[in-house]
Every structure is written in structure tokens, then in C-alpha cells.
Image (cartoon, rainbow, N blue to C red):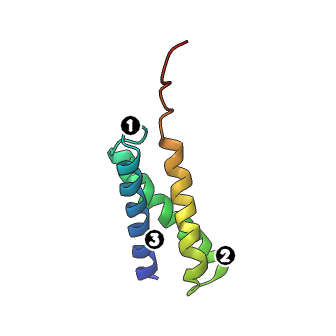
Amino acid sequence: MLWEAVTYAALGLAVTLVATQLFPARLPRSPLALATGPAAALAGGLVLRTIFGAGRLEMTVPGALVVSVALLSLLARPGRPSHVA
């Protein structure tokens, strides 16, 4: 179980780093973002591990990824309009 938790947290951190690189204006690399990604992936992975059972990484890892992306998207700032009408 410890390795699964480490896997979920590492996946969440990787998702956070990629998102902050791809969208620096909308999602700055802040301590909040760097904590939200791994925490969300860990929580999502552990909830799905409880639902599907231990050893089902093919179900829990994608679920942890989805939860991490969903919660990170809540931190994203809205885009600025290209022109003012």
C-alpha cells in the first residue's frame, strides 16, 4: 500500500508540474498548486483503492489522475480577453 500511495502522490506532482509549465499564466507554480496536485491524486487513488480493492492499479492510477486534474482545474485563473470591445 505504501508504494501505491507514493505512486499516486508522484503522479499528482507530475501532473502539477506539467500543468504549470503548459499554462503558466492561468496556473502559476505556487505552493497551493504544488500541494493540491499530489494531495488530490493521493485522495482519489486511495478512495478508488477502497472501491476496487488492492492491486488494481489499472483502475486506480487513471482515477487518481482524473481527480488530480479536476482539482487542479479549479485553481486555474480565467483567461484574459484578447481585446476589449
Seen at 58% across and 81% down, the residue is 58
Numbered badge on residue 51: 2
Secondary structure, mark 2, is helix
Residue at 55% across, 87% down: 55
Q: Looking at numbered disc 2 in the image, what kind of residue is underneath it? A: Ile
The residue type indicated by label 3 comes to Tyr
Q: Label 1, on which residue?
A: 25
Give 44 or 18, whichever is nearer the viewer.
Answer: 18
Give residue 33's position: percent from left, percent from top. 39, 48
**Which amino acid type corresponds to the residue marked 1 in the rendered image?**
Ala
Front position among marks 3 and 1? 1
Q: Which residue is located at x 48 percent, y 40 percent?
A: 76
- 51 relative to 82, above or below: below
Name the outermost residue toward the bottom.
Answer: 55
Q: Mark 3 and mark 1 in contact? Answer it, CB < 8 Å.
A: no
Q: Earlier in the sequence, mark 2 or mark 1?
A: 1
Q: Mark 3 or mark 2, which is nearer to you?
A: 3
Q: CA distance from mark 3 to mark 1?
A: 26 Å
Coordinates of residue 39 in the picture (x, y in percent): 45, 59
Secondary structure under the numbered disc 3 in the rendered image? helix
